[in-house]
Image (cartoon, helix red, strand yellow):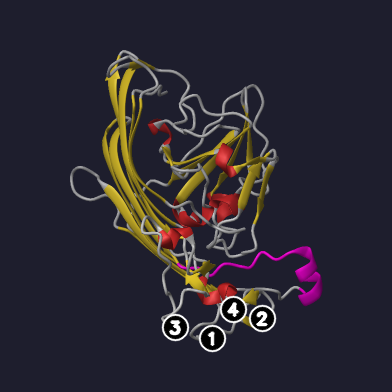
Amino acid sequence: MTNHRSALSRTRLHVLIPALAGSLFAYSAALAQSTATQATEVVVTGKRAARSTDGLATQVQEAKDESIVNQTFFKTQVGSENFAQLINMLPGVTYSSEDPTGITSGDLRIHGIDGAHLGVTIDGDPVNDTGNYAIYPGEYLPAELTDHINVNIGATSVDSPTASAVGGTVDIVSKKPSVTPQTTLKLTGGDYDYFRAYGEVDPGAIGPTGATSYIGVNYDHAEKWKGAGDLLREGVDGKVYQPLGGRDFISVAADYIYEAPIFYYSGSRAQLAQYGDNFDYNTTWVAPTVTPGKADGVPANGGQAGSDTNFYEIHPNPVQFGQVRGASLFDLGHGLAFTFDPSFFYTLANGGGATALSECDPRLKGSTGHCVDLNGDGDTLDTVAVYSPSNTETHRYGVITVKPVR
């Protein structure tokens, strides 16, 4: 499953106000998106105890089918697994990917509904792509900093801020910083040169205000299990949490992730039958022929995947993803509260790839009507392999406020 993105560049202001109640809203049941859920404990009430497998997955007996996976389960998994892998065992949830490490992004579905029709949030802020609503699980919060993940199957939270057609929601909730000082260091290794390093520092409550914070860094690297190329992810995440007395608080969290994986080649059934399980992009590059006055083509280099357009080094997927999330809760008394959660979302992605381009392609001729000599052989008769990535740059601002809280 590849991470191709449409060629888009956009800036959007996204303001969601679920009620016209000014700054005040009566208390009601807080669902997964609400600021009030920024806690390290999930409480389920009912006549019968919720089913549980020692905390690995909790079935919530509510009016909708909602499941929760928490840190008890996360700690049993490979550290680099993305959120979609962590919820893959829940009923109705399926995630498929050619990458076992979790560095790249695959295909998440809930009851058969694809990711573009699901709403995914981190601390209530949407992370679906602005252009096509796709989700990229490999780019989001690491498991160590995720307190729990709520999955609403076939339904949505009433205050979900997603703009996509919602066939379900996945709400990733970051953990609160520890009130006691602690330091975490993890080193992991495995087959295919898999290596992961994760470090986290929590200085504990500081000063008379009792502010807490953490900063975490992670580095993940592996060789592809077939074909040539690396999988790489680096990230830094931080959060500051200031309690204000009672339930009131202000917090700011920020995440930055850089990925640079090489795609796996998606071959046909006939190609897989011919070349076997190791079928992937070509590992050699053949210099193109340059003959004046002759229609030169893209070299067929004898590799399994065909011509130079399928050379593996021109099929990377570099991605920069960043997010800043603010959250606050102010208890006004008399059953009223005010919340204000601003956010900023940034993505710069390049889908890689190459095209066999004619020197008289309309995209080159443009308004001039003239062909372009790309390879400098004095004619415009040729077809040339041209690097043609799909670029996306997104700047998205959001504010979520005036929500029901418990």
Q: Which residue is mark 3?
A: 377
Q: How far, Cα to Cα, is label 3 from label 4?
A: 32 Å
Whether residue 265 is in magenta: the answer is yes
- Kind of element beneath mark 4: loop
Q: Position of residue 388 (x, y in %)?
A: 47, 65
- Kind of element beneath mark 1: loop
Q: Nearer the viewer, mark 1 or mark 4?
A: 1
The answer to which of marks 3 and 4 sits earlier in the sequence is 4
Q: How far, Cα to Cα, is label 3 from label 1?
A: 10 Å
* Residue range (magenta): 260-276
The one nearer the camera, 376 or 232, is 376
Residue at 57 percent of width and 26 percent of height: 45
Q: Which residue is mark 2?
A: 303
The answer to which of marks 3 and 1 sits earlier in the sequence is 1
Q: Which residue is mark 1?
A: 289
Q: Is residue 180 left or right of residue 56?
A: left
Q: Nearer the viewer, mark 4 or mark 2?
A: 2
- Kind of element beneath mark 2: strand
What amino acid type should be assigned to the residue bearing mark 1?
Thr
Instruction: Please identify the quadrant where the N terminus is shown.
Output: bottom right
Asked whether the residues under the numbered discs 2 and 3 touch, taking CB atoms below 8 Å apart as contact, a structural biologist would say no
Residue 405, image quadrant: top left
Q: How far, Cα to Cα, is label 4 from label 2?
A: 13 Å
